[in-house]
Image (tube, helix red, strand yellow):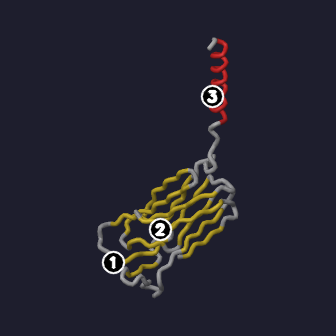
Amino acid sequence: MNIEKIKKVISIFLLIFTFASFYGCEKGKNDISNEVKFSDFKVSGCKSSYDNGSMKSTTQNAIVHDTIYAKGIDNNTLKVWTTNTLFSCCASEIKQNVVIENTTIVVNILQSEDGAKCNCVCGYGIEFLLSDLEKGQKYFVIIKKDIFDYYSFDLTFSKETNLIFKF
């Protein structure tokens, strides 16, 4: 093979390599340009206590239910809140650990107990904000309680997002 052919092959290879370097790494369909942010985590006090044996309210004599709301509050923020998420009556602290990967958001709600023995649970309201969401982007939200999956849902975000999940 003569030198001219080798130079031509190398030039073509370099051109292809350069083209692939600049244009071959497009963002994937599920990639988002801004990283979603988690903020304003709030927990209400114990709303109602429940006997662990019957799971009926000691104050209302009703079966325990929870409702989760997800509502767009502006062009890039979603407010998520619950009405009656059950934790131990002896929970000394309820906190969160959040993992966000692209469009999947995992919110793990953890309780710490003060060591006292309890045979009851309390219904708490949990609230948080997810911001820097993109309009029209599909997101998957997973809410966990300690090591257990509690509830999950997907949504296509817009300011008009208004979801209610009763269970």
Disc 2 residue type (three-letter): Tyr
Disc 1 residue type (three-letter): Asn
Q: Which residue is mark 1?
A: 119
Q: Which numbered mark, 1 or 2, is in the foreground of this view? A: 2
Quote the CA–CA distance across marks 1 and 2: 21 Å
Quote the CA–CA distance across marks 1 and 3: 67 Å
Which residue appears at 45% of the width and 88% of the height? 61
Mark closest to the chain's N terminus, 1 or 2: 1
Quarter-wise, where is residue 118 in the image? Answer: bottom left
Vertical arrangement, residue 65 with respect to residue 77, above or below: below
Which residue appears at 60% of the width and 66% of the height? 70
Vertical arrangement, residue 160 with respect to residue 50, above or below: above
Q: Secondary structure at mark 1?
A: loop
Q: Which residue is mark 3?
A: 17
Q: Secondary structure at mark 2?
A: strand
Quote the CA–CA distance across marks 3 and 2: 48 Å
| Discs 3, 2 touching: Cβ within 8 Å | no
Q: Which residue is mark 2?
A: 150
Disc 3 residue type (three-letter): Phe
Q: Which numbered mark, 1 or 3, is in the foreground of this view? A: 3
Quarter-wise, where is residue 163 in the image? Answer: bottom right
Q: Percent position (x, y) of residue 149?
A: 46, 65
Q: Nearer the viewer, residue 123 or 33?
A: 33
> Which quadrant of the rendered structure holds the N terminus?
top right
Mark closest to the chain's N terminus, 1 or 3: 3
Q: How many neighbours does mark 1 have within 10 angstroms: few (below 14), some (14-19), or many (20 or more)?
A: few
Vertical arrangement, residue 26 with respect to residue 113, above or below: above
Q: Percent position (x, y) of residue 28?
A: 62, 46
